[in-house]
Amino acid sequence: MNRPEDFELISFFGVEPVLRVRAVPWDFNGLTFKAVRGVEQVECHIEMDVGAVSIRWHSGDIERVAVELKWVDSISLFRSITGEVLLINGVAQNPDVSIELQLDPTVFVRVHARPKHP
């Protein structure tokens, strides 16, 4: 899976990840980032070696999003007019599906799915 540099992910989430296995490089490991923005809590778990990503977003006691993604091709970061966004592409080997996660200045998750035309 293509992905941002370690320091870019740490900067985006604002925290160091919890590693599934210590002393194993990130590219072959599971990473869990837990970002807190006021009452908003976002947990993003990335299994680099198998291309799996899960996102859980809670606003206080309310679960806003719970998404499990498999066969992710790439993760990237980009700047939009609203802030920095984590972009997850190629979900389930489908280039027409992507997920956006933004943490600042507000938290949001957006799903893009373009229908395939025969």
Image (cartoon, helix red, strand yellow):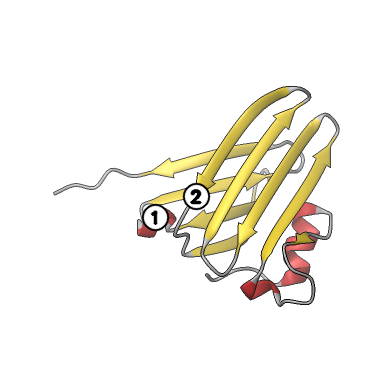
The answer, for residue 79, to whether it is visible in the render is no
Q: Nearer the viewer, residue 110 or 56?
A: 56
Viewed as shown, does residue 76 lie left or right of 36? left
* Residue 62 drawn above or below residue 88: above
According to the picture, the residue beneath numbered tag 2 turns out to be: 69
Secondary structure of the residue carrying tag 1 is: helix
Viewed as shown, does residue 70 lie left or right of 49? left
The residue positioned farthest toward the front in the image shown: 21
* Residue 47 drawn above or below residue 103: below
Q: Quadrant of residue 108?
A: top right
Q: Nearer the viewer, residue 67 or 30?
A: 30
Identity, as a three-letter code, of the amino acid under mark 2: Leu
- Contact (Cβ within 8 Å) of mark 1 with mark 2: yes
Secondary structure of the residue carrying tag 2 is: strand
* Residue 81 drawn above or below residue 17: above
Q: Dot 1, how many residues are within 10 Å of its Cα: few (below 14), some (14-19), or many (20+)?
A: some
Taking the spot 70% from the left edge, 60% from the top edge, the residue there is 31
Taking the spot 53% from the left edge, 57% from the top edge, the residue there is 52
- Residue 15, given in percent of the width and then of the height, sits at 84, 55
According to the picture, the residue beneath numbered tag 1 turns out to be: 92
